[in-house]
Image (cartoon, rainbow, N blue to C red):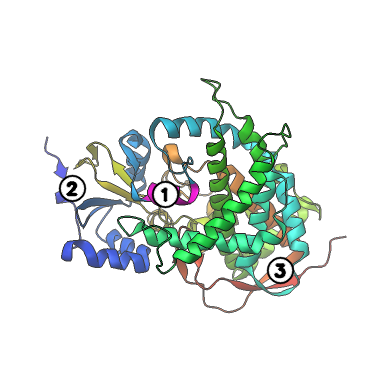
Amino acid sequence: MSHAAWDDLPAHPTRWWGLPTLSAMRRDYLAVLARQRTLGDLVAQRLLTERAVDVFHPDLVRALMVEQAEAMVRWERGPEVFSDLMGQSVLVTEGATWQRQRRMLMQAFTPRRVAGYAALMTAAAVDGLARVPPGEVAMDRLYSHLTMDVISRTLFSTPIGDDTAAAADAVQVLSETALAEMFWPMTLPDWLPLPGKAAKRRASRLLHGLLAGHIHARRDTADERPDLLGMLKALRDESTGEALSAQEIYDQCMVSFQAGHETSATALLWWSWLLATHPEAQARARAEVDAVLAGRVPTADDAATLPWLSATLKEAMRLYPPVAALMTRRLTRAVMVAGVRLPARTLVRVTPWLLHRDPRWWPEAEAFRPERFLDGAPEIPRGAYIPFGLGPRVCLGQHFAVLEMTLIAALLLQRFTLNPMGDMPPKPRMAVTLRPEGGLTLRLAARRKQA
């Protein structure tokens, strides 16, 4: 039986070894991938000496990301860039080191453990929202502050306080720097007098200084608070009894601080825009929150009793997945998928932005329809909705993020009605996460307190 090869896959013509394509990717990565999508479900691309393949069908995504997961590692450039920011954390390690870290860290992010952080999450949100005056509000700054405070309290049991704005800005600088560096074959030393290097140095110093202060203060103490740092220090490998090293604890705190803050803030930004421009969906979510909570602060148990609110958040992450393009994988050996033999070292790219907007799986794919995620709705094909990734590397913090977003969204709707400032939707701009270009400002109208 004959099989097709990578060279047989549809592909756009390559000019100048793919250099114009790389330049276009730097300007608008998602537009380049959308153009790939017009050629089919498995599409080839040549970039310099690299063979790449884009995967646009949920079945093929699962065949590669789940069934052939052991034949793939992360594309080297991604871990190189992120390790520069976050050390050898579970986000970037491979092989036995990753398996050990993942196995241990899963204990800290089970739904039961995450539920224990709910009171810390709501305390941060209540304090933050109490300082928001009605009127025009920069939602990107608001959510950056709220989620930064949430992650600070869940990591260290301590509000981030006056450092919030500077830390949130630092995360954005590092996020944009990381994406830019992805398109270079190597990362030049940060001490060089090049554009962006000074801002990167300042941002990195600020974040490392913040984390080091908290971690060092508890390094040699028996003070084991019920926060994530305490959990990380207490973790033991079930097979060996080994603990995480001091450096591993530091690196996991750094990735939690950066990634855990930014993805939730980004998802809430798009959710806010969508509810502001869909007042009926917003009114239904607000009525559900009022009926279930009757004005009290939500708990972890309440999240499951707010199906419409949860559906609006899921639909927001469908239309605007925070991580719109997953980190590229490299095949360590040849694999067969859909009758096509992909050779070893092929780069495999999966793009949630395009999977989530494919009209084959999503009728009226560009429309905001939260009812897609209610009980009784047509079944969503597995692999068509992957806001937290797929396969063995699915996001460890997904339960944390979903609970955090649900609690913050409920508290916001208790206090305010969201109104748009104009009719034009924000333009998505991809750094590591997909954020509205130029930020997002909404008009918040204070609600009367419930009796």
Decide: is 96 above or below 285: above
Q: Which residue is mark 3?
A: 417
Magenta stretch: give its range: 78-86
Decide: is 198 above or below 244: below
Tell me where residue 164 appears, x and y as whole percent: 66, 60
Q: Is residue 432 visible?
A: yes
Who's the residue at 61% across and 44% down the image? 400
Residue type of the residue flagged with mark 2: Trp
Tell me where residue 291 appears, x and y as whole percent: 77, 54
Q: Decide which of tag 1 and tag 3 comes sooner along the chain.
A: 1
Tell me where residue 323 appears, x and y as whole percent: 46, 55
Depth check, front residue: 353 or 81: 81
Residue at the extreme bottom of the image, as rendered: 422
Depth check, front residue: 75 or 449: 75
* Position of residue 439 in the picture relative to residue 98 (left or right): right
Residue type of the residue flagged with mark 3: Thr
